[in-house]
């Protein structure tokens, strides 16, 4: 059923009826499978990709490199948890290489982000350093290229 | 003043304009049409393939290649045909890289056909065969294929059409516009019929990757058929590379040699950038093909099911990316049906007769579109069909 997941990952608006036809399965089975995936946490949610730059919403995105001192027994998880529970944190990854945690943060203004880093992130115990990078432009996200919507320009030849 | 009517070759002057063209000209005058007319992939050429084309240009590979095409590309082509379809051709002596599958068809016909030769063309089919045969002075002999046979070519129909003047049999499968395929079992009686005759098969296999649930069989892989078969194929459909105009043909050496002679005078060689892109496509593009074909397959089921649920009957197509519903129950001609659907419901599908007279009563629907687009088109067709029944 990996095919089902791949299709849904690209387009969550397809209905169980449509999916069942496309995959040659019973609608009931598709429904049940999706429910199971949701129950098992394989499917965690359904969202919409929005290019906020085309709206008047003010926002800023930052990528923050965080170095931490791992705690005995719990490794990075306890600190990660303290960070990801902030709703402003959109993504959090544990990284290999020069730093430990990669935080993707969204705020209304740069000042707001700076405040978050200085007051909340940097003050967490065992966080040894942070480096904040502001996103200037989003070219591609979740496999989708941001920009002009392409028209169908294919010629009617044969 | 030049008398153009006397200047233009009478064969060309008499050539009917492509039936498909007329409908598309009409379509071009209208806005907000949801069309299912396009006969090419909606995917963009995968980036790694595009990049090799770009790279060849930026590093100055702007020369002509050898007439037959880059040897590296010909080697990739023959190795691909070997691993996918168990076909064995020499890259040096039996393979010519062409400007799309279309050039391959044209060159093959010119190399084989002399005035008065007869060419058997199963219909409905792609529009180019009969005009190109006529240009050689040959006589196109359409053979009707039928809905109840799922538009497969039947040996008994072929046999009836054979005469001592028959020189070439076109085998356009997987088929545009019907979506029909010829499996190995379907091909065996055709091969049995042709094996001992002085007849060449032109097998147009441009849709060979678009078969659903089984692997395409080339008639050239059947016993005794390789020596009498010219395979015309290309990159357009499988790799979503229509605009690159890159195709190829494989044929036994004497035929390939004759074709290459023509190709060198007419074309010189296929576009060099396209050839470099083609090498990348065959080397590293198989997963792209698999992904695109799975997507076509899902849409195929979706549109087949959708048409049936609104009462438009079509046999289940197993190849290409077309479905070919039977519209006879509505009592309109194909042209009337398609024009009314276009004018009244702003949805475009192609009238069947564009692909041969026996296409009357049918229409071609392409599913090289997103599911969302197909869904919208289906709802317009449904509204039209309901209106006709009311």
Image (cartoon, coloured by chain):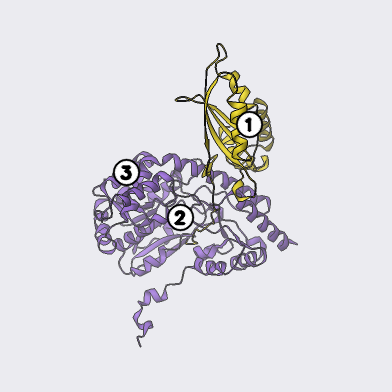
Chain colours: A yellow, B purple
The quadrant of the picture occupied by the C terminus of chain B is bottom right
Identify the chain of the residue marked 2, using the numbered disc in the image. B
Decide: is A63 above or below B185.
above
Mark in front: 3 vs 1:
1
Decide: is A143 above or below B251.
above
Q: Residue B120 appears at what percent x and percent y?
A: 40, 61
Disc 1 from disc 2: Cα separation:
55 Å
Left or right of B308 in this view: B143: left
Disc 2 from disc 3: Cα separation:
38 Å
Identify the chain of the residue marked 3, using the numbered disc in the image. B
> Residue A43, labelled with which disc?
1
The quadrant of the picture occupied by the N terminus of chain B is bottom left
Q: Residue B295 appears at what percent x and percent y?
A: 53, 44
Residue tagged 3: B76
Residue B156 seen in render: yes
Taking the view exactly as shown, the residue that stands out farthest to the right is: B390
Residue tagged 2: B156
Mark in front: 1 vs 2:
1
State the SS at label 2.
helix
Which corner quadrant of the image does residue B298 belong to?
Answer: top right
Decide: is B336 above or below A56.
below
Disc 3 from disc 1: Cα separation:
41 Å
């Amino acid at each position: 059923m990996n095919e089902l997941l791949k299709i849904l990952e690209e387009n969550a608006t397809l209905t169980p009826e449509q999916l069942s036809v496309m995959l040659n399965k019973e609608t009931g089975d598709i429904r049940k499978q999706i429910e199971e995936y949701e129950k098992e946490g394989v499917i965690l949610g359904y969202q919409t990709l929005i290019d906020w730059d085309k709206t008047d919403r003010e926002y800023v995105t930052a990528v923050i490199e965080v170095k931490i001192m791992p705690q005995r027994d719990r490794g990075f998880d306890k600190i990660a948890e303290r960070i990801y529970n902030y709703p402003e944190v959109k993504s959090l990854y544990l990284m290999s290489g020069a730093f430990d945690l990669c935080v993707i943060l969204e705020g209304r203004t740069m000042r707001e982000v700076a405040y978050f880093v200085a007051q909340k992130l940097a003050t967490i115990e065992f966080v040894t350093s942070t480096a904040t990078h502001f996103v200037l432009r989003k070219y591609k996200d979740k496999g989708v290229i941001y920009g002009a919507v392409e028209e169908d320009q294919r010629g009617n030849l044969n | 003043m030049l008398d153009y009517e006397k200047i233009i070759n009478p064969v060309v002057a008499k050539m009917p304009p492509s039936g498909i063209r007329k409908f598309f000209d009409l379509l071009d005058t209208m806005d907000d049409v949801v069309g299912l007319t396009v006969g090419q992939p909606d995917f963009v050429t995968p980036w790694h393939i595009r990049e090799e084309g770009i790279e060849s240009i930026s590093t100055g590979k702007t020369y002509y290649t050898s007439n037959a095409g880059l040897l590296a590309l010909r080697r990739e082509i023959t190795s691909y045909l070997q691993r996918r379809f168990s076909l064995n051709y020499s890259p040096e002596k039996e393979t010519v890289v062409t400007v799309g599958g279309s050039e391959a068809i044209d060159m093959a016909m010119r190399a084989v056909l002399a005035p008065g030769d007869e060419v058997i063309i199963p219909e409905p089919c792609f529009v180019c065969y009969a005009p190109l045969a006529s240009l050689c002075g040959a006589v196109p002999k359409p053979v009707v294929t039928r809905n109840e046979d799922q538009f497969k070519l039947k040996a008994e129909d072929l046999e009836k059409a054979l005469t001592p003047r028959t020189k070439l049999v076109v085998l356009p499968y997987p088929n545009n516009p019907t979506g029909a395929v010829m499996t190995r079992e379907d091909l065996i009686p055709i091969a049995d019929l042709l094996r001992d005759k002085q007849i060449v098969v032109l097998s147009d296999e441009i849709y060979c990757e678009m078969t659903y649930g089984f692997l395409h069989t080339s008639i050239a892989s059947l016993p005794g058929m390789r020596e009498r078969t010219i395979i015309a194929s290309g990159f357009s459909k499988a790799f979503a590379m229509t605009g690159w105009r890159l195709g190829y043909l494989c044929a036994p050496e004497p035929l390939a040699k004759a074709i290459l002679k023509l190709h060198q005078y007419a074309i010189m060689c296929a576009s060099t950038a396209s050839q470099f892109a083609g090498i990348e496509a065959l080397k590293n593009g198989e997963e792209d093909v698999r992904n695109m074909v799975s997507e076509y397959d899902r849409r195929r089921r979706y549109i087949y099911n959708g048409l049936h649920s609104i009462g438009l009957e079509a046999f289940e197509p197993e190849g290409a990316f077309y479905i070919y519903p039977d519209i006879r129950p509505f009592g309109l001609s194909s042209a009337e049906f398609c024009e009314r659907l276009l004018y009244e419901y702003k949805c475009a599908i192609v009238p069947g007769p564009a692909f041969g007279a026996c296409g009357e009563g049918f229409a071609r629907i392409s599913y090289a579109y997103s599911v969302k687009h197909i869904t919208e088109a289906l709802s317009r067709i449904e509204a039209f069909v309901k209106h006709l029944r009311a």
